[in-house]
Amino acid sequence: MDTLTRPAIAFVNPSVGFSDRRKSKPIGLAYIMAYLEKAGFPSSGFDFGDSEDDAVELAALYGLDRFDVVGFSVYNESFRAAVAMAEWIRSRRPRCLIVLGGPHATAVHEHILRRHPCVDVVVRREGEEAMLELVSCLHDRAKLTAIRGTTWRAPSSGSGSGSDGGGGLLVNEDRDFVPDLDQIPFPDAEFVSHSGYPDLTYYDEVQGRLKAALTICSSRSCPYDCSFCGVLTIGRKYRSREAERVVAELLHFRERHGVDYEHVYFSDANFFVSPTRALEVAEALYEADPQVTFSFGTRVNQILKAADVLPRLKERGLRFIELGIESASEPVLERLAKHVKPEVNVAAVRLLKRLGIEISLDFIMLDPATTLADIRANMEFLRETGFYDYVPHDHLYSALVLYEGTPIRDFYARRFGVVFDPDELPSPFTLFERPEVQRFSDTLRAFRKQWQDRIDGALAQGELALASIGDDGLSPGRATHARLQLDVVSLRHAPNLLTERLLADAEAGFPLLDAGGLEALLPRLGHDRVPLHDLIERTGAVAREAGFARAPGAVGPHGRD
């Protein structure tokens, strides 16, 4: 590599394929970029996270071959795109140092270097300190390849400090986790984004207004060991930031962006590990600005253990909790290593509903060993706990993803007697052990493809129309308002009812599906029990009459984007 006083550095978030739930910049890379910037090494960020364009064409379009160091943050879904870009960069700029990091790279670091010569080094686990050493030691090969927390291809002689002793790799010892997260600069880094970032908002039903929202990560990792969670790849060493620094970050980005952010989405893997600390953060936010609201994700057992803290959190602005329920089936919960019983899920949901705290549902409807009895337990749970009115309906179609480096992937590799290709993420919809579950899943996915977008659009239109139609007897009148209310509720229930009908048909051996296909399972809905197509059309017509010709994209279900 040419002698440089300040190398040209790029960080790339490769595509995982199109996602309509994309919200904000890749915060992990932003932290690394800010850390390097503070040390005098500015870098450029490229975010192709939801692009459907060809990876090589993107690399060429944005000139990724003009950098001396290119770092990719990779997940299972984005690995192929990262390798394609790396190969192109290598062909155009042979002396560029190509670095991979992130959960997938950490899990299969040795495999990557053995199979993919375009990659020079893998940074394992956290990246800030290792990347700073890398860009500081570019011209000293001995120091460069001895950096803790990195894996390299060994020299052709095959031996050296940290060598794997015959595999041709230098696997250096793990680097300690960053002990004090408050010493890391705020993730104030800009990315060139192929698709752009929509404004992040939250509709606060309590205050009755739309708020500008900001994503903040206030801690790292999680002390639990759920078998399917990619956090295990990086490590279970939980660390948290001081409440004052969380508030300082909010105020920093308010000034930096000129936006009065009034809702905080905490992106922590598990925000509620310490209820006392969670309350300290809430109190600090409230003291800084009483209008600020917030939301976070956690586990069901922690909700019950800290039930006494929740009312105070609500007083201080807590609006909803993303709750890791996953399943209502005890055998599935055991496979997922959740260490809770189904009744704990029910108790946590009922507690939050009693307190008036919204729930954002994390759910895994199917896994490879799922039985119809497991699905029945899930559907009964959704009905009994009031989730028939919950949107979006994604939880009905969800299936367990076997991420590299997770215990559940190893469990199924042993169960199936196979070796999954480390470069591949097997489709979760092709691994079902039972043919009746496979057919159930295929049919449900067909319904989703054919009907779900139409249901979503009609729901958004209908709910906006309801907000605009008065019930004071004026045009279009009380009767229209009441009928539309029933139709909107029916649309919310439609995917659930279809799923239940399909499940009952599967339990009976699929007589309806065999006789009439998917159409034979579609429920009749609305105040007059009309076909689903007619209900969608009728809702759209009322919405158009009320002045809503199409659904806006600003606010999502439960006020979340």
Image: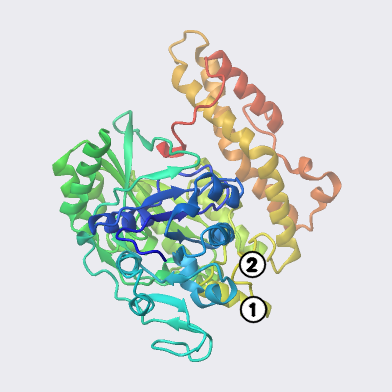
* x 17%, y 38%: residue: 289
In this orientation, which residue lies closer to the viewer: 139 or 466? 139
Residue flagged by tag 2: what amino acid is it?
Pro
Q: Where is residue 298 in the image (x, y as percent from the top left)?
A: 36, 58
Label 1: how many residues lie within 10 Å, few (<14), some (14-19) or many (20+)? few
Q: How far apart are marks 1 and 2 (CA)?
A: 10 Å
Asked if disc 1 and disc 2 are in contact, CB closer than 8 Å, the reply is: yes
Judge the density around disc 2: few (<14), some (14-19), many (≥20) Cα neighbours within 10 Å.
some
- How has the structure been colored for display? rainbow
Residue 136, image x and y in percent?
A: 30, 67
Q: Residue 349, how many percent across, how many down? A: 41, 53
Decide: is 409 above or below 45.
below
Left/right of residue 470 with respect to residue 399 in the rendered view: left
| Residue beneath disc 2 | 368
N-terminal label among 1 and 2: 2
Work out whether residue 357 or residue 155 is closer to the camera in this orientation and state it. 155
Question: Which residue is labeled 1 in the image?
Answer: 415
Residue at image x 41%, y 39%? 560
